[in-house]
Image: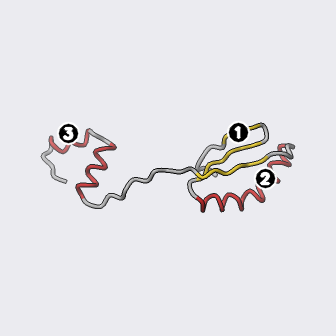
Amino acid sequence: MQMNIPELKKPSSILFSVANDMNKVEMSREMELLLPFLRNQLKHHSLNILLDVKKTIREDAVYSPNEKYQHLLKINPALESLRQKFDLDF
């Protein structure tokens, strides 16, 4: 539940995003106990929690040393100046 922050969509609907279908199934199981507890504690018996699977774009895996270096270079462009300054190879 700490993966994402829930959003209040309507006064009685909370949207919770999960990373994949497996997380959605796990959260659905947890909702069986959590939802009655929240309804009782908040005294809001029409409370509903909606689960949404967030679609993420996954980059290709990095395998060769050159691919790893290019990936790190995308993250931190200053890496190239260090490589040149210390005359390093990757």
Q: Residue placed at 19% from the left, 54% from the top?
A: 90
Q: Amino acid at mark 3?
A: Ser
Q: Which residue is mark 3?
A: 81
Q: Secondary structure at mark 2?
A: helix
Mark 3 Cα-neighbour bin, 10 Å: few <14, some 14–19, many ≥20 = few
**Whether label 2 touches label 1, CB < 8 Å:** no
Report the amino acid beneath label 2: Leu
Number of marks = 3
Q: Which residue corresponds to the image point at 26% horizontal and 51% vertical from the top-left?
A: 69
Which mark sits nearer the N-terminus, 2 or 1? Answer: 1
Left or right placement of residue 80 versus residue 16 in this view: left
What is the quadrant of residue 84 in the picture? top left
Comparing labels 1 and 3, the label whose residue is closer to the camera: 1
Residue wearing tag 2: 35
Query: Alpha-carbon distance for marks 1 and 3?
Result: 46 Å
Q: Mark 1 is on which residue type?
A: Leu
Q: CA distance from mark 2 to mark 1?
A: 15 Å
Q: What residue sits right under mark 1 in the picture? A: 8
Q: Decide which of tag 3 and tag 2 comes sooner along the chain.
A: 2
In this view of the protein, which residue sits in the foreground, 10 or 65? 10
**Residue 61 picture location, percent across and down:** 36, 59
Which is in the foreground here, disc 2 or disc 1?
A: 1
Image position, residue 28 (x, y; %):
70, 59
Q: Determine whether the residue tagged by mark 1 lies in a helix, strand or loop.
A: strand
Q: Give neighbour class at mark 2: few <14, some 14-19, many 20+ (Cα, 10 Å).
A: some
Nearer the camera: disc 3 or disc 2: 2
Q: Which quadrant would residue 31 be assigned to in this image?
A: bottom right
